[in-house]
Amino acid sequence: MPASRPYHHGDLRSALLASAERTLRTKGITALSLRELAREAGVSHAAPGRHFKDKQALLNALALVGYDRLEQALNAADDPELPLEPRLTALARAYLRFALDNAELLELMYARKHDPDAHEQMAAAVDRTVGALERVVADAMSRGEILAGDPARVTLVTGAGLHGLASLAAAGMLAPEEALDSIGELVHHMLYGIKPR
């Protein structure tokens, strides 16, 4: 029998997540295996179990990494001092750029197969990202910048448009830069149809 490899790694959790993301991007979710990730990290096949009880726990953690990154992108793009249209355009552009650069990760983030143990963490992550957009819409409604209504529904419609652009770009039916260039028009048309008259 081959000698077992010792558990010794500086930051195994981060190394496993980085390797898992590379695999997700290049080979897809079905190619992810804790045993293979351990081999790549040079640790025993049991070592990942100290951080992830199973593949689903790894996927949950990877989705949370994606939400953290999306939150950073949205926060970097947001300027509450801007008028509503350029503010929403900047946020939408940041969201779409993230979606284009992280298509596989975004799909994992929005998967509904998360472990029930991770429900609270996922809900908090969604609130920090999609919820932040919804709060911008709700604030605009409260100030009379757009018609009063359900902020969640307006955010859903906006998100559907962004996902549509991202899907078209991912399928090669629309160049990524063309998708990004159309964000201003998407936001303008959305606002024009719901501005008070």
Image (cartoon, rainbow, N blue to C red):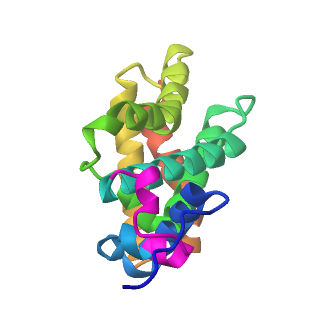
Is residue 172 something that shows in the picture? no
* Rendered residue at 51%/73% (across/down): 5
Tell me the magenta residue range: 37-53
Q: Is residue 54 above or below residue 91?
A: below
Count of marks, rendered view: 0
Q: Is residue 10 above or below residue 28?
A: above
Front-most of 29 and 93? 29
* Rendered residue at 48%/22% (across/down): 138
Which residue lies most toward the top here? 142
User: Residue 93: x percent and y percent?
Assistant: 59, 54
User: Residue 35: x percent and y percent?
Assistant: 38, 72
Image check: 9 left or right of 161? right
User: Residue 18: x percent and y percent?
Assistant: 56, 65
User: Residue 156: x percent and y percent?
Assistant: 35, 40
Which residue lies most toward the right here? 81
Front-most of 22 and 15? 15
- Residue 59: quarter of image: bottom left
Image check: 112 left or right of 131? left
- Residue 87: quarter of image: top right
